[in-house]
Image: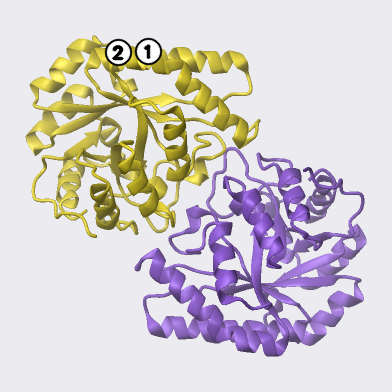
Chain colours: A yellow, B purple
Amino acid sequence: MSAQPIKDLSKLCIHTITTKPWSLEEAAEKYEKAGVKGISIWRQYLGGRDIAASGDLLRSHGLEIVSLVRGGFFPAVSAKTREQAIQDNLKAIDEAAALGAPMIVLVCGADPGQSLEKSRMQIREGIEKVLPQAISKGVKLAIEPLHPMYADTRSAVNTLRQANEMAEAIDSDHVGVAADVYHLWWDPDLKTELLRCGQNGNLFAFHICDWLSPTTDFLNDRGLMGDGCIDIPTIRGWAEEAGFAGYNEVEIFSDRHWAGDQNDFLDKIVSHYYHC
Amino acid sequence: MSAQPIKDLSKLCIHTITTKPWSLEEAAEKYEKAGVKGISIWRQYLGGRDIAASGDLLRSHGLEIVSLVRGGFFPAVSAKTREQAIQDNLKAIDEAAALGAPMIVLVCGADPGQSLEKSRMQIREGIEKVLPQAISKGVKLAIEPLHPMYADTRSAVNTLRQANEMAEAIDSDHVGVAADVYHLWWDPDLKTELLRCGQNGNLFAFHICDWLSPTTDFLNDRGLMGDGCIDIPTIRGWAEEAGFAGYNEVEIFSDRHWAGDQNDFLDKIVSHYYHC
């Protein structure tokens, strides 16, 4: 089943990191002008600001705050570092609540100094430790499985199946999954696991961008939708089949695009969005 | 179950690409002197040579030829390119037979211009087309699942489960799997699938190196065993539990190591091998 064609921008959300050089004010103004409806806020954009006022500012531009990015990074060989991660995640939950963001995306973390199994256990423990705070503040937590090329330091959760299993094991309506086509497109089980994720009520977020051929940097060489080899319409169709009706969140890290004019880049995001 | 400690070099094999600057003669001489027992030959080292004589040369140095690397690259949008791939694989089979190599490692291929499903179908078709020639020449074909970061252009087979399923579907004692820790270490199903692979008689080859943190290049930044985060002894233990008793093949692509003194590098390969 192919996705419904995109006819308007009502489900278009952009992550502030995508237009990295812009301040929160610039992003809010420009996104509104371009017709973007949702915005996901990376925490560094909130540094030194009145967070509640920042939320009001964004809403005054007609933007819905979709998520706060990012929490996680729970595993560490050092117990002290793990405790710092818990504290930081509790802080992120408070920030999300103050901002009016309904959800935090979790980049779960990994420590190359220990086994992936141990890191996965610490991820689950970490989520369970901060969950009461998340529930009391009304903030959801979305486990984002990351591409296996990030298994050493960024996430020991590398497939949608692993994320599904963890969310199902934790079994809270405040814990679900953020599915990003960049991390998951290669997975032969992607359709099955997206359907499972949606059917269990765990498909909290859907992120889009593209995989460039060749990709020259491990972090900051993501492509605009349509510029790479990911069949986004097919995957988006599976997400819709799974019941997902939320935003399509554009999350592009790209040294190349960041070095160019961000107005042009935003124009391209919008025009490419119609074909993804 | 942990692996048996490595007590000698009787199962150490090195891929010629690992010491890229060395000619076949240099590699043969140096490997023999270092006590290496197996050698896997990359095809470019055979260019313009009498292949049968090259096999004799290697054996005269006491080296067992473990595999010829590499065949594959079957998928392509263009039918002409696919046919060229078939021809090239038939040639590789003849080369392996002439060299006295019992096996060809298949880097299966992928074309970013078509779906992964289509590429996977073409991989299976390609293998089945060249299989009669492989059987008649007594050369085995080892499907190597490649890390998902290579799914765009190098292989649409990205997990050991996929490789197992393909080998089982083709169901020939001349088609099996080459398992490389670099490609597979992140996979939560690795133990299960290694056992399945061995129990089905399909574990033809076991490749080792390490994943560096950080890794700075998609292709040529592999690490020496022990310099990265892969728990090789545990994975090697699973391979042994699966019945594998073949060579541990060191396959390291590294601009950094290639730029240094290859004699020192070979010394390090041997010393690191004892701890992996």
Question: What chain letter is assigned to the residue under label 2?
Answer: A
Q: Is residue B122 left or right of residue B26?
A: left
Q: Nearer the viewer, residue A264 or A109?
A: A109
Q: Position of residue A28 (x, y in %)?
A: 15, 27
Q: Are marks 2 and 1 on the same chain?
A: yes
Write down the quadrant of residue B103 in the picture. Answer: bottom right
Residue bearing mark 1: A133
Q: How many marks?
A: 2
Nearest the viewer among A122 and A265 is A122
Mark 1 chain: A
Q: Amino acid at mark 1?
A: Gln
Q: Position of residue B138 (x, y in %)?
A: 73, 85
User: In this image, A170 relative to A27: left or right?
Assistant: right
Which residue is at a point 82% across and 54% down the rendered structure image?
B263
Q: Secondary structure at mark 2?
A: helix
Which secondary structure lies at badge 1?
A: helix
- Kindly tell me whether residue B17 is visible in this rendering: no
Q: Position of residue B196 (x, y in %)?
A: 65, 59
Q: Is residue B131 left or right of residue A196?
A: right
User: At x 45% / y 64%, what residue is drawn?
Assistant: B153
The answer to whether the residues at label 2 and label 1 have Cβ atoms under 8 Å apart is yes
The residue lying at 21 percent from left, 11 percent from top is A52
State how far apart marks 2 and 1 are (Cα).
6 Å
Q: Is residue A186 above or below residue A116?
A: below
- Would you name the residue on which mark 2 appears? A137
Neighbor class of circle 2 (other Cα within 10 Å; few <14, some 14-19, many 20+) is some
Indicate the quadrant where residue B220 lies: bottom right
From the top left corner, tell me how far across and down residue A163 is, in percent: 44, 38
Q: Badge 1 local density, few (<14 within 10 Å), some, or many (20+)?
A: some
